[in-house]
Amino acid sequence: MRSNSLSKISSILFSVFLLFSCSSDLNFDQVNDFKIEPVFVANLAYFNIPANRLVDDGGNNITYDVRDFDVFKEKFFTERLKKAEFNFEVENNIDRDFVLNMLLLNDQDQILETLSFAVPSYKGTPNVIKYPTEVFENARLDLLKQTQKIGFVVVIAAGPPLNSQSKGNLRLRSSATAYLVVE
Amino acid sequence: MRKALILYLFFHLSCFAQNRELLYNFTSIPQSSLVNPGADVSYKYYFGFPVLSGVSANIGSSGFSAYDLFSDNGVDFNQKVRDVINKSSSKDRVITNQQLEIFSGGFRVGGKESRSYISFGLYQEFDFFMFVPKDLALLALNGNRDYIGKYFNLGDLNMKAEVLSVFHVGFNKKLNDRFVFGGRAKIYSSGANATSTKNSGYIYTGEEAGTPNLYNQVISSDLELRTSGIAKFTKDEYEGNIVSDIAHNTFFNGSLGLGIDAGITYNIKDNLQLTASVIDLGFVKQTKDIETLTYKGSYRYNGANPDFLDFNDPENVFDEFDQAIPRDTLYNKYTTWRPTKIYTSIQYSFGESRPDDECNCRGTVNTYYKNAVGLQLFAMSAPREPLVALTAFYRRNIFRKLDVKATYTFDTFSNTNIGLGLAGTIGPVNIYALVNNVLEYKDISKASSAAFQLGINFVFQDKDD
């Protein structure tokens, strides 16, 4: 009886163990293929200049400012950035033509690239202009990645003089879209 | 390749949550007293085969299986990752538990007529619990562009992990034929603990009219990760073997804690039995190599904002971010509660039988029931809400010393979880094997949960029993 139950127990136990061996072919090397391509959007730059700050005599004038732009110091981001897009939107409620230049500057304050946007004067109707998307890929992207500062140059074309009583604003809103590849 | 092999073993061998529905009240296995110290056991003395008396592992994932991610079916791996994340929810859990008994034993105290027992043992345990961080996975996978207006919930980050050793001593007494009670004291020694269960906050990108910027971008963060016994491995100057250092800490230099188990068996009638137990009601005071990281604060990202007034106000996005949501490191001791388990069962026995495979010369007739059916309820404390499982079982005595138990369990992970257990005794050698989710064993990789346990003991009864 004992040997009989012994063999039964062992054969049942053995078959239980056999159950462990059944599995679909799993291929864990697939982890090496891991690659994700997230797309992030973020604010790039904005301003809202009231006309009364652009006091001028009616001739050509230039207003200038520069801001640090240090996202490319972040290596993880910069190394994985495969493509970038900038979108710009300007609203002008001032009775003057403008040209807005955005200067991409490196850490030596050298100009890497100038983005230029012509802004027509306000004619009494809403005046929001969406500019074509600036796409940065390949060599242009490499230049972008050296950017450490952004310079903003507002060129005021000749027209009616502006003083502290002048009405209206010049508004910029812009965004960046970052295409990353993480693998 | 080695990594793949480890992963493979992990998914292949291990597999459910800590419910031990097969072991519970399977009293021919001495280890059943680990899930009910008041189990109706009977032996003169026993000891477990060192290291092999109780090996168990289980893994459960309520959202997906290993097959979904790693099947060799030609589908692009990244597509599978995407599919798994899309179909899972932040309520899905991934749970792993592994136990290894180092040694165990028990003996009857008092005379031959005594029905009091003392048991003891040392086992090692690994616990991992995580909710699927769905929102953050979506953000990492896709970015925020297609989720304008969505709050990515940082509260989805919810996990804890612990490696510990448990030394225990238990007492079990059969007061009379109707009532058995037992209790066990435990000393926990935790070699490594990581707990991050109280997170909140969000990452948000919105487009709201009338705002000066294109996007309204806010990160609001209240994150905390508490670790014990891990910090030194993260330092650059660490040069050692993490596995052996954790093992050493687990047994010899862990954070200490205390806990109790308690249980009863009550025979309402000869063939109607009620049992209940509470396991791991205890805590660990995390004191060794403590490091708590917090990220608390709120940050709004606006982009560059020239004012055309002053050239010299430097902006540094990363500094601003670090100031708004600083990373703080704290070194406070903290207390973690063990996952407390509650079991209860009701069992009806039938098919009265006499032992026919053994000579019974003394004339005392020990009848017993060959069959038992019943229900078991299991609950375990867990972050957010407890885990609950209901099990129906059938137990049959095939020979005098060979028992089989089958279970059908409903829980978070599966509605078709059938388990099979066998325990046989040959002479003094007691062997058992318990396998859960047998339907899925046709293809274990497709199982969302599975568990196994096996072990060998030496059990000695009185010679003339």
Image (cartoon, grey):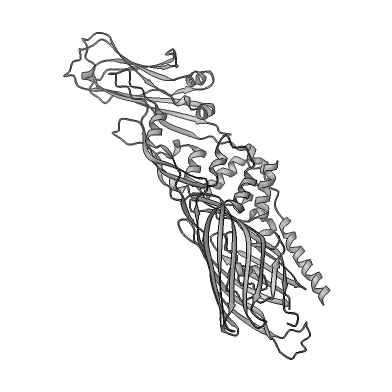
- Residue at the (75%, 90%) spot, across then down: B362
Vertical relation: B233 (above or below) B64: above
- Residue B130 is situated, as x and y percent measured from the top left of the image, at 52, 51
Q: Total number of numbered labels?
A: 0
- Coordinates of residue A154 in the picture (x, y in percent): 31, 15
Q: Quadrant of residue B364?
A: bottom right
Q: Is residue B246 above or below residue A132?
A: below
Q: Which image quadrant for residue B115?
A: bottom right
- Tell me: A67 left or right of A121: right
| Residue located at (51% from left, 53% from top) | B92
Asked whether residue B328 is in view, the answer is yes
Residue drawn 57% across and 83% down? Answer: B178
- Using the rendered view, name the quadrant where residue B30 is placed: bottom right
**With respect to residue A157, does B415 lie above or below?**
below
Residue B359 image point, x, y percent? 79, 85
Quadrant occupied by the N terminus of chain B: top right
Front-most of residues B364 and A113: B364
Residue B279 in view: no
- Which residue is the extreme one toward the left? A165
Q: Nearer the viewer, residue B445 or B377?
A: B377
Percent coordinates x, y for residue A138 in the rendering: 54, 21
Image check: A168 left or right of B21?
Answer: left
Point out the residue furthest to the top here.
A59
- Quadrant for the C terminus of chain B in the image: bottom right
The image shows residue B338, relative to residue A166, as above or below, that is below
Q: Residue furthest bottom?
A: B363
